[in-house]
Amino acid sequence: MSSEIGSRIAKNSFYNVIRTCITLPITLVITQYIIKQLGTEEFGVWVLVGVISSYAQLSDFGITESLVKFIAEYKAKNDYIRLNQVINTALSMYLIVGTICCSLFLIAIPFIVTTVLNIPLKMQDTAIYIFNIAIALFLVNLLMGIFGSLIIGFQRMGYSNFINVLSVSLTALGSVYSVSRGYGLKGLISTNALVVGVTVCSNVLAARHLFPELRINPVRYFSRDQASSIMSFSWKVQISNMTQLMIFQADRVLLSHYIGLDAVSLYEVANRIATQARGLIVSVFSPMIPASSALQAQNEEERVTGLYRRSFKYMAIISVLFSALVIALAHPFIETWMGSGFEKSATTLQILMVAYMANLLTGPGSFILSGINKPHIAMRSSLLAGVSNLFLCIVLVEWIGYFGIVWGIFASILASGIYFIMMVHKNIPGLQWGLYGHTLLRPLLLALLFGIPLLVIGEMMHVRGYVMLCLLAICYIVPVVAGVWQGSYLDSFDRSLLHKFNPIGRYF
């Protein structure tokens, strides 16, 4: 991996991390406030709004990820004609497929609310109203998403992250206002509508600034060849998306159906932390899709292999050590954040973080294989995870109740992760199995050495309060960072990259 590619990825990853560090506290504060104001039942309905919107995402048909890949590829070649063709072709496809699918969703909403989700009768009318608005907002986001895809494909994450922080901040302010004024769920969905408008305008302005040659004219720039290229890539991504929903969204649907809205809220408290933690780590590595696409466009196969080796090492360091910290402090953090009565959420968080850690380790391979036009590998792995997850969750929720969902997710993610790593070795040349022993051993040992004492201290001393939690986190982070830094685990390239993009790196 060259210094230029490494620098670009590191810069974009830095922007992504800054965004997550800003939005995470906002999300935590707003989640607690909404639960306290609305109660667990209404909050459970609001959680399901996100689930319904996620399933509406299927109408994307994998086009978004395809669009990012092709935009990055054509940008690397400075082919502005094809850039306009692929953008306008995708817009036409979005308009046709999105309108049809979202219309079907709107027709099915009453059945979903009453039968699939088993929402109590007193809340059904409100749920149907806000679900309908959510689907309409999703369609707007889908059509206007081409501008966000252009920003990412151009590898200008500073713009996309600024817009994301803006939207999260506006959502938080609007949510506080709506709930405090007693507008409830209808106020929250109205806030979302306003934020969608601001986000769309911001993405359009940024895209126009980055690509002045952009022309939106689907009639003139539609290309059958581009449509064929998009579909040949996107249908594999679509299957992966479907199975990802079976893993990361079916949980709350099953909980609502079998147990109730209170269980959805308890689960969501844990899931939001686990998802935010996972998202923080994923944000570091998401710039690899456009970067690897650019490398493929330049026939840089060896550098793609080097990109995987280094990115897996970085993923191992971050995911293992960060997951161990979250697991160790799960109970004191949840009680500090939400108060008493959420012990089940803390245990859920610990199990989910182990599962998500396994899932994160497949991330570099998934990003890179998608970038080099091999999304079918992730598709097969996701299909295994999705089918096994749905089967296990349905069986286990009937057998052991609430935690059956959690353990079903755990088992399916672990099995699919092992399969995926095996497939990576068949599709990225030059990889050796010794890579995993070398990269995983030190982070795992450090996580156990410093994570277990942290877990014991947090429980035995009944640690509570954000100050004490921060002190414990520092007591964990300092020795594990020193443990990673010492010796030959990081080579000269790794150290130079850290020195360049870590303002405190020069002092180690």
Image (cartoon, rainbow, N blue to C red):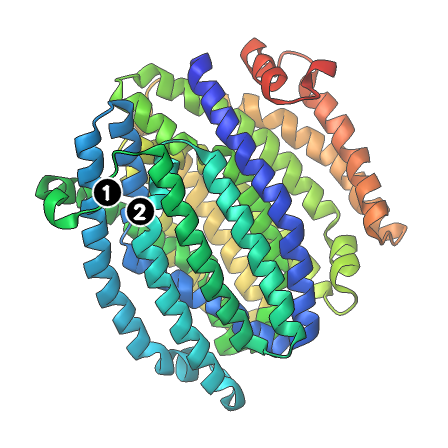
For the point 88% across and 51% down, the residue is 460
Badge 2 amino acid: Ile
Quarter of the image containing the N terminus? top left
Horizontal side of 23 relative to 448 (left or right) equals left
Quadrant of the image containing the C terminus: top right
Q: Residue 252, how many percent across, how many down?
A: 50, 67
Measured from the top left, where is residue 268 in percent x and y? 59, 63
435 vs 150, nearest the viewer: 150
The residue shown at (31%, 25%) is 294
Q: Is residue 285 among what the camera can see?
A: yes
Residue under numbered circle 1: 87
Q: Quadrant of residue 227?
A: top left
Check disc 1 and give the amino acid type: Ile
Determine the secondary structure under disc 1: helix
* Residue denoted by label 2: 146
Residue at x 39% of width, y 65% of height: 137
From the viewer's perspective, is 79 left or right of 32? left
Residue 91: percent from left, percent from top: 23, 50
- The location of residue 240, given as percent across then percent down, is 33, 49
Q: Are marks 1 and 2 in contact (CB under 8 Å)?
A: yes
Q: Residue at x 22, y 67 (%)?
A: 100
Q: Nearer the viewer, residue 426 or 265?
A: 265
Given the current orientation, which residue lies at the most extreme bottom position?
Answer: 121
